[in-house]
Every structure is written in structure tokens, then in C-alpha cells.
Amino acid sequence: MDTEGKKFIGYHGTDYNGEKCIIRSRHFNLSNRDDEWLGSGIYFFIDENQNEAVSNALKWAINFKGFKFYTVLQCNISIEKNRLIDFNNDETWRSLFHDYRKEVIKDIKSRGIKIQTSKHKFDCKIINEICEKFNILAVKQQRYISKLENSDLPMSEVPNCTILCVRDNCLLDEQSIKVKRRGKYE
């Protein structure tokens, strides 16, 4: 087992009420919606260019969540390498995801059930099951998120950010949580 640690500085977009709650408790609530990109967890932008990561968290809070009073929180994150799925740099995990997905589809179809869900929901289900099976605590991937760009631009297949989904608060350095940017969207 490779237990070498990976360290990230993550940026999380929220609103003023979320900021107050997170700063007070030193704890993030995990999102458990069934259509999360990388499964259940706490989502951070971790782009190599920290200014870009902060900007992406800010745009997420404003453009996707619709927060008028926004906050970008910064947090240090440490993960053992063997507890991280890195879909960008590890073909083994990508192959395992697709093989497992095919087996689930085959099983569902063999029972005469028609799959009636979005690709986001199905991917979320598969990632959550893989994380449970292999005791994975975080998932990393470069993605294209249209809400980070001007709405009149055509969509792209080339990623415009890197996100990290953290499945347990134990990976977060709670003392490092701080406000990086705060403001009001006009």
C-alpha cells in the first residue's frame, strides 16, 4: 500500500451564513445529492494557479449557487495517496471506474430494468460505490464547468478547473480554515 501523503490547498465557495457556520464549527457539511460529479463529499477547487482556484470558487458561489453575499474559504487538505482517486493521472482508476460501470449496467439490464437516470446521477452512484468498496476518502478530477465562464461562450470538452471531492472532514486541517475572499455580488 502506498501511504505517501498528498497535500492540497482547497478553495470552497459558500455564502455568508455558510462561512459563519463553517468557521464556528471548523467543520464542512458533506453534500449528499445524487447528482454530484465526483460522488458525495465537500467540494474544493484546487487548481495549480491559486488565484484561478479562488476565482473558480467565487464564480461557483455566485453563478451556480446564486449567492448575493459570497465567501471563499481556504483550507489545507492532506490525503494518503492510497485513499485518493485521481482520475487525471491514474489510468488504473479510470479503467476500474469504466469496468465497474459496465458490470453495473449489465446487471441492471439482466434484471430487465431500464436505466432511467442522468449521466451525472449514474456516475455519482458508481463513484460512491467504488469509494465505499475501496475505502477511498477523496476524488480528484479536472473538469469543464460552464458556470465558471461567461454564459455566451460555447461549452467545451477541455477542462477549465480541477476539483477535489473530500469525503471526510478528517482530511481537513481545521485550524487552517480561513476566509480568503468575501463580498457582495451586485
Image (cartoon, grey):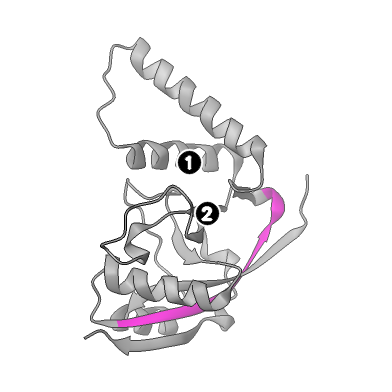
Where in the figure is residue 124, as x and y percent of width and height? 40, 42
Amino acid under disc 2:
Gln
Q: Earlier in the sequence, mark 2 or mark 1?
A: 1
Q: Is residue 153 left or right of residue 29?
A: left
Q: Is residue 72 left or right of residue 83?
A: left
State the residue position of label 2: 142
Q: Is residue 111 left or right of residue 138?
A: left
Q: 55 or 79, which lies in front?
A: 55
Q: Which mark is residue 94?
A: none
Q: Nearer the viewer, mark 2 or mark 1?
A: 2
The local crowd at label 1, few if under 14, some if 14 to 19, many if 20 or more residues have their Cα within 10 Å, is: many
Magenta region, mostly helix, strand or loop? strand
State the residue position of label 1: 127
Q: 84 or 182, which lies in front?
A: 182
Where in the figure is residue 27, as x and y percent of width and height? 46, 73
Where in the figure is residue 160, as x and y percent of width and height? 47, 60
Q: Quadrant of residue 23?
A: bottom left
Query: Magenta segment, which residues?
Result: 70-82
- Regarding mark 1 in the picture, which secondary structure is present there? helix
Where 138 sits versus 132, above or below?
Answer: below
Count of labels in the image: 2
